[in-house]
Image: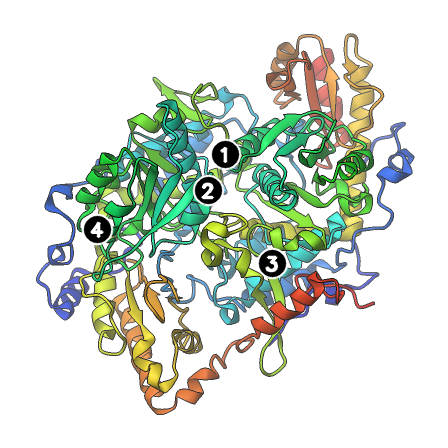
Amino acid sequence: MPYLVHSPEDRAAMLAAIGVRSMDDLLVDIPTSLRIPKLDLSDGLSEFETMAHVTALAARNRLYPDRLTFRGGGVYRRFVPAAVAAVTSKPEFYTAYTPYQPEASQGTLQAIYEFQTLIAELTGLDVANASLYDGATAVAEAAMMARTHTDRTEVLVAGYLHPEYLEVLRAFGEGRGIKVRRGSDPGPKTAAVIFQQPDFLGLLVDAKALTEAAHGVGALAIACVDPISLAVLAPPGEYGADIAVGEGQQLGMHPSFGGPHVGFMACRRELVRRLPGRLVGSAHDAEGRRGFVLALAAREQHIRREKASSNICTNHSLCALAASVYMTYMGPDGMRQVAEVSFERAHVLAERLSALPGWELAFPERQFLSEFPIRVPNAPAVLRKLARKGILGGLNVQRWFRELKGVLTFTCTEVNDPMSIDELVQAVSA
Amino acid sequence: MSEPLSFESSRPNAPAPRLPASGVEGKARLDALPREMLRSRAPGLPRLSEPEIMRHYSRLASMNYSISEQFYPLGSCTMKYNPVANEAAAALPGFAGLHPYQPEETVQGALELMWRLEQALCAIVGVERVTLQPAAGAHGEWTALRMIKAYQHSKGEHRGEVLVPDSAHGTNPASAALSGFTVVEVSSGEDGRISLADLKSKLSSNTAALMLTNPNTLGLFERQILDIAELVHGAGAMLYYDGANLNAFMGICRPGDMGFDAVHMNLHKTFTTPHGGGGPGAGPVGVKAELVPFLPTPTVENSDGHYTLNHKRPQSIGRVRSFYGNFGMLVRAYTYIVAMGGDGLTQASRDAVLSANYLRVQVQDDLDMPHDGPCMHEFVASAQNLSHEGVKALDIAKALLDRDFYAPTIYFPLVVPEALMVEPTETESKATLDAFAKAIKEIVAEARTNPQKLHQEPRNLPVGRLDDVAAARKINTYLQGLSEDPILRWKAPS
C-alpha cells in the first residue's frame, strides 16, 4: 500500500515487543459495538491510476489562457516568476510544521519575519502579522479587533466591499455581537469604518476622507487594500488608517479556483496586542547570535484559550512565503512596473470598449487602476461571444448588486498583452 | 551559520527584474491621478538580483527541520509523509489555473472532485454531509459551533455554554468564545479520560455542546463515549468532534456512530496535505442530518453527474470564507484518499496505533507514563522523573533537536506536568522509532550524569536557545512608546 512502511514482519515484531498478540489487543478501549467491518470506500489505486483519474477530472475543466482572462473580482492572473515555485516547493519549507521549536525552524521563522516587514513596508503601518486565511477572514478579524478596541458594536461598510468579504464579515460578526451596516455615515456606536481601495469594482475611493470620517466619531479606519496597487497608491499608513488588510493572491499565487491564497494584516503600534494569529520577533541566544521566535504568544489561543484575540492557529504560512519571494523578486521597481503596465493596458481597454456602440463606463467620473466597471448591452450575450473565442470576459456584478444591471468589470494586467486586447475588442465588435 | 535578512543584503542599484512593457499608447497617465492618492515614496522592499534571492531562500530552507528530512513526532499534529503525487495533482493546470468565477459548466471537474471528496469524508467519519469551506481546524470548529447555535435558535432554544475538557486544544475554547458562547471546563478523571461525574454536574439546559477530541489529547480512547453521548443528548445539547486525532481510527470506527453531531477534520493532518511551516491547511466539517440546513454556502450538489454550487440555502449560517475553501488542499487530500482507498486508510490507522504503542513501550522505563496503555495513535510521557536532576521536558526537546529529531509537543496537554506528547504516525519505519527510543535513553542517561550539559542544548543548530523573555521585554518597550525598534519587523538603521 502506498506510503506505508511496515512489513508484515515489522508488525509482528512490534506487536511482540509490546507484548500483545494482535492489533485488536491494542484497540480494546473501543466499544465493540462501534467497530466497523470496513470503510465504505473503494480500495486504493496505483499512483498511475490515481493520477490518471485526477488528471481526467482536471481535464473536465476549461482552462482559459492567462492572456485571454479579463476577469478579476478578487482573484487575478499575473506573471508569477519561476522563483516562487522553486522556493515554495522546497520540502524543507512545505513539509515543516508551525515553528514551535525555533532552533530547528529558523528558515520558516526568518521568512515570516521578512514577510511581516514586507507587508508593514507596503502598507506603511507599524507591524504586520504572520498571515491569515484570506482577504475575507482578514476583514472579519480586523472588525473584531475594532469591536474589542472601541467596545462598540457597529461596523460600517462604506462603498463596494467585495460581496463575499461582506458575507464572511456578517457570519463572523454574529458570534461577537457585531452589527454590520452598509453606508457612509459613522456614528457614536461605530467601531470601525471598512472600505476597499480600489473597491470591488476597481474604482478608487477617497480613502483619506473615509479615514477622517471614522476618526471623527472615534472609530477605527480599516482599509482593505490590493497589494499590487500599493506600489503606486498612497498606503494606509500615509492617510492614517489604523488597520490594513487584504488578499495577497496577486503576490505570486495561481488562481487555483480561489485558494489557498493568503490574507494579510498590518496595524498601528497601539493595536499590536489585539492582532490575531502568529507574530515573529527577533531574539538572541546566549552567544549573542540573532534568531527568530514566535512572539507575543499571550494573545493566542494555545495560551489564552477562551480569552485569545482570535481562534486562529494554522494560518497560511507557505502562501506568505510565496508572497515574500514575489515581493523580493520584484522589489519596489518591479512592483511599480507591474502596476503601471496594468494601469495603462486597462485604460486602453476601457477607452476602446467604451467607444463601442451601447457600451459606457458605469462610473465615468471615477478613477481606477487595472479593473473597471462598464455597462454593456446584453451582458450574458457578450460573455458567450467572448467564451466562443476562448476569452474569459468581464465579471457580471449584477449577481451581487442589483443596481449594477448589465455591468461587467474587466481587469487587465501585465499578462494581457496588447494583442489580447485587440482580440477581445474584435470579439465583442463582431 | 546565519543568513542576513533580505533587507540587509539589499543594494540600491541591484538590477530590477525585466518585465513586459505596456506596449500600448493610451491617454490616461498614472501620475495624473490626484497627488494625495499616490504614494509619497516607494515602499521599502529589498532590491536583490535573482541569483542572490535564490541563494537566500536555499540557505533559509537548510535551517529548517521538516518531515522530508527528520522524524517529526509532534503530538496531535500528525506529521506524516506528504506524498509528492499530491503536489503534482494540485499543480495540474486544469486545477491551478481555474478562476473561481468561471461559469459552472467550465469547472465541472473541480466541482466533481469536491463532491467526491465530500462523499469520501462522509464515509470515513459517518456523517450526512460535509462542508469543504473552512481553511483550518480552528476555522472548522467555529463553523460547526455557528451551525449548532443556528440549529438551536431555529428550535427556539438559546443555549449559552459550551463544555470543553481541560485536556482540550486551545482552539476549542477560543472558537467557542468567538462564536458567542461561554466556556465551561470539564475535568479529566484519574484515568486521563473525561470525568463523567463532572460532566453531569456541568450539563444543563444552558449547554449548547460538548467539544471532545477522541482519542483525547492523552492518546486515550474515551471508552465511555456512548454514555457521554447519551448524557449530552439527554441534556438537549450537541456533541462536537475535534478531528485532530482522527488518524487513530479510520476504518476502525467512526465519530458519527459514536454520537457526534458535528465533526471537523484536518486535511493537513490525517489526509497528508503538507503543513507548509504553518499552513495552509483545510478544516472540513461533517454534520448529521439535523445540521445540514445550516451548512455554510455554497455547497456542491450533484444531479446525475451535473455539478452545481448551491448558494441558496435559506437557513445557512452564511459564508465562512471567500470562494470555495482551500481548493488546492482539497485536490491533495482527494488524491491521497484515492491512492490509499478504504483498505489503505484502515491500514494507515492501524499502523499509526501500532507505532505509537511500540514507541511507548520502548521509552516507558526512561520517562514517566502518567497513564496506563494501550494508547491509540499517540502517547503522553512526562519528564517529571528527572525533576531531581533539574531536567525539564524542554531540555529533552532541545536535546532531541541536537540528535537530528524534531521534538514532541511539550507542555501539552496542560493536565500532565512536564508533558511530552509523541505521535509517530504510520509513515515512520521501525528503524526510525528504534533510533528515537535510543536517543531518549541517551538523553535520560545524560540527565542522570550530566544534567548541566542538557541545559545548553541544542548546540548543533544555527542558533542556541533564544531568549524570548528579553525579546518580549523589548517588544513591550516598543509598544509603550519607549523605543522605536518594534522587534516584530526589520527597520532600516536611522
Identified at 54% across, 43% down, the residue is: A133
Label 4 neighbourhood size at 10 Å, few (<14), some (14-19), many (20+)?
few
Q: Which residue is mark 3?
A: A112
Q: CA distance from mark 2 to mark 3?
A: 21 Å
x, y percent for residue B162: 37, 42
Query: Relative to A142, is A367 above or below?
Result: above
- The answer to whether residue B136 is seen in the rendering is no
User: Which three-letter amino acid code belongs to the residue tagged 2?
Assistant: His
Total numbered badges shown on the rendered structure: 4
A414 lies left or right of A321: right
Relative to A295, is B412 on the left or the right?
A: left
Instruction: Give the foreground label among 2 and 3.
Output: 2
- Residue at the (15%, 42%) spot, across then down: A34
* Residue A12 is at least partly visible in this image: yes
Q: From the viewer's perspective, is the residue at label 4 or at label 2 nearer?
A: 4
Q: Which residue is mark 2?
A: B139
Type of amino acid under label 1: Val
Q: Are marks 4 and 2 on the same chain?
A: yes
**Would you say A394 lies left or right of B483 here?**
left
Foreground: disc 3 or disc 1: 1
The quadrant in which residue A184 appears is top right
Lower sequence index among marks 4 and 2: 2
The colouring scheme, among rainbow, by chain, secondary structure or one colour, is: rainbow
Find the residue positioned furthest to the left.
A21
Q: Where does residue A331 sit, x and y in percent of width and height? A: 75, 53
Image location (x, y in percent) of residue B463: 56, 76
C-alpha distance separating marks 4 and 1: 36 Å
